[in-house]
Every structure is written in structure tokens, then in C-alpha cells.
Image (spheres, rainbow, N blue to C red):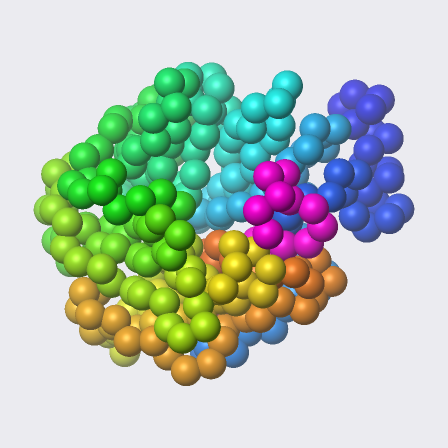
């Protein structure tokens, strides 16, 4: 480790905060997947950097290894690094500017990628979980017609792949696609829409439940960050969804006083573990 890195780690440990204030990946736990309690003593700490950075998105591969996404500003441009237990993947090395919303499914990482020309699209990784070599562009019909795309999520259930993307121009909604092989996709319908007092629903993450239903955790908010909450909807067929009552997690902790978003929920032993982004401090683009 460099001298600067060592000093930075000492400073972060002493003040229990990053040298550069940015959004952090935090954790909450639940016995039933509905009522979550913050794990106040846990925060993902990315390898030290003096560059401004923001941490969003967590995914888990088939071997149970976690991957953490961090964006950092290099000479005025933001780019992505995916960290895992065994190493890291730099988007720049793959000739990409950004890798957003990574999710492992059936041995492939699906993601919303932005290439060096500035084009953003859904893609699927080639290579192995230990060594991603490239991303193959996928065609999600109508995606380009639905406005800005925030993120995606992919799940395979039985013999079918299900995909969701958060899209919109101003207001955000979650739209759905399906595929038989993970490569050829068909648009289905708008799956989740905002309710009264909301303009944004995005950041989907779907988990299979023991009773045969599925729960989608997602963000609901009036603003892009301030006041963002994590809520949930349920489905029996992954096509028709109903919003559950209440809020799964609201802002108010030490590291998420401004908002909570980007849920990633996993079953660990006899509990549900929610990894999420906590908003606090200034945002790089001022979009709060």
C-alpha cells in the first residue's frame, strides 16, 4: 500500500468517515424480509482513493461472492470499478466508461453499460465470474423509446428470464421484458408505477419467497435523492405486481440521513440482508 493510501486509511479510521464525502453502501437485516433494522456497525469500505467517488449497487455471483460497484472521478470523467473478494474489474480496461446495475444471473453479469462513444445499452458479460473479458450488447426492444434509463435487474425463474429497467423522462417507472435464452428479449409492459406523492420508482431487485411469491424491492421518491425510501411490491407470476403497505427502509441513519436507494437483497442463512446506498453530503452532479 502507498504512503498516501496508508495515511488515508488512518484518517478514515480516526474520523469514521471517507476523506471525500460520497454516497456509501450500507446494510440492514430482517427476519421476514419486511421489517429491516440497520446494521449500524457495517459499511462497505472501498480501497482508498483521493479521487471523489460514489458507491452504488451490489450483486452476488453463483459462488456466493459479492461484487461492489464504485464510481470515481478521473480528470473530470466518472468511470466504474467493480470490486470482488478476489480482485477488481476496471471499466476503462474493457473500453467502457460505465458499468451500472450489475447483476449476476446464470453465470453471466448483466449490466447497463456505457461505451467510449457515449452509447448506453443493456449488455451481458463474456468470460467467467473470475475473469470478465467483454460485454455483449443485447437488444431490449423499446428501451430507447422509454426515456432515460437508470438501471436494470435480471432474474431467471423456471425456464424464462425476466428483466426490468427503470425508465422515464422526468417521472420514472419500472418496465418489464422476458427472454427464453437471455439473449433475445421481448418487451412486456410497464410493471411498477409511482403512487400519489411520488415521481420516481426505480432500482428494482427481485427475490423469490418461500411461499412461491416474488418480492421486488425498489426505490420510491418525489426527488432523485432527498427523501428516497425503499419499498416493495409482490407478485405470483413476475408479471403483475401489487405494492405492499409500509416502507422497508426510510432515511434517518448516520450514513443515510438524506435518502436510501439501490436495494440489493439476498438470503443469508435464516435472514434477509439488504445492501443499499445511503445518501448524505454533496452529490457530484448536484442532482438532489
Please say whether residue 273 is one of the residues in the magenta stretch: yes
Answer above or below: position of 87 versus 168: above
Q: Residue 49 location in percent, x, y? A: 71, 29
Residue 242 seen:
yes
Answer above or below: position of 255 versus 271: above
Residue in the image at 38% along x and 57% along y: 171
Image-quadrant location for residue 219: bottom left
Q: Nearer the viewer, residue 231 or 200?
A: 200
Answer above or below: position of 284 versus 74: below
Q: Nearer the viewer, residue 120 or 138?
A: 120
Horizontal side of residue 78 vs 240, given as left or right? right
Q: Nearer the viewer, residue 160 or 230?
A: 230
Q: Nearer the viewer, residue 41 or 85?
A: 41
Q: Which residues are magenta?
A: 272-288
Q: Residue 227 location in percent, x, y? A: 58, 65
What quarter of the picture does the N terminus occupy? Answer: top right
Residue in the image at 49% along x and 64% along y: 222
Q: Residue 91 location in percent, x, y? A: 47, 24
Amino acid at each position: 500500500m502507498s504512503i498516501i493510501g496508508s495515511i488515508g486509511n488512518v484518517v478514515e479510521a480516526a474520523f469514521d468517515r471517507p476523506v471525500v464525502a460520497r454516497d456509501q453502501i450500507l446494510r440492514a437485516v430482517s427476519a421476514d424480509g419486511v421489517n429491516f433494522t440497520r446494521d449500524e456497525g457495517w459499511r462497505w469500505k472501498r480501497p482508498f482513493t483521493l479521487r471523489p467517488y460514489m458507491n452504488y449497487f451490489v450483486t452476488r455471483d453463483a459462488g456466493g461472492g459479492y461484487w461492489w460497484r464504485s464510481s470515481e472521478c478521473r480528470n473530470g470523467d466518472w468511470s466504474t470499478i467493480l470490486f470482488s473478494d478476489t480482485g477488481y474489474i476496471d471499466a476503462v480496461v474493457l473500453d467502457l466508461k460505465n458499468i451500472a446495475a450489475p447483476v449476476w444471473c446464470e453465470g453471466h453479469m448483466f449490466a447497463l453499460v456505457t461505451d467510449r462513444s457515449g452509447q448506453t445499452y443493456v449488455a451481458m458479460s463474456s468470460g467467467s465470474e473470475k475473469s470478465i473479458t467483454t460485454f455483449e450488447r443485447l437488444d431490449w426492444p423499446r428501451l430507447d423509446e422509454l426515456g432515460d434509463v437508470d438501471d436494470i435487474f435480471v432474474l431467471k425463474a423456471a425456464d424464462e428470464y425476466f428483466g426490468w429497467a427503470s425508465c422515464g423522462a422526468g417521472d420514472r417507472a419500472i418496465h418489464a421484458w422476458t427472454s427464453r435464452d437471455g439473449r433475445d428479449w421481448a418487451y412486456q409492459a410497464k410493471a411498477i408505477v409511482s403512487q400519489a406523492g411520488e415521481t420516481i420508482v426505480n432500482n428494482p431487485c427481485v427475490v423469490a419467497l418461500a411461499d412461491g411469491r416474488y418480492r421486488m424491492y425498489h426505490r420510491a421518491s418525489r426527488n432523485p435523492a432527498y427523501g428516497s425510501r425503499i419499498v416493495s411490491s409482490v407478485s405470483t407470476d413476475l408479471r403483475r405486481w401489487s405494492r405492499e403497505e409500509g416502507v422497508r427502509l426510510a432515511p434517518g441513519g448516520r450514513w443515510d440521513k438524506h435518502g436510501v436507494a439501490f436495494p440489493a437483497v439476498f438470503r443469508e442463512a435464516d435472514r434477509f440482508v439488504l445492501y443499499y446506498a445511503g445518501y448524505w453530503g454533496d452529490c457530484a452532479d448536484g442532482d438532489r
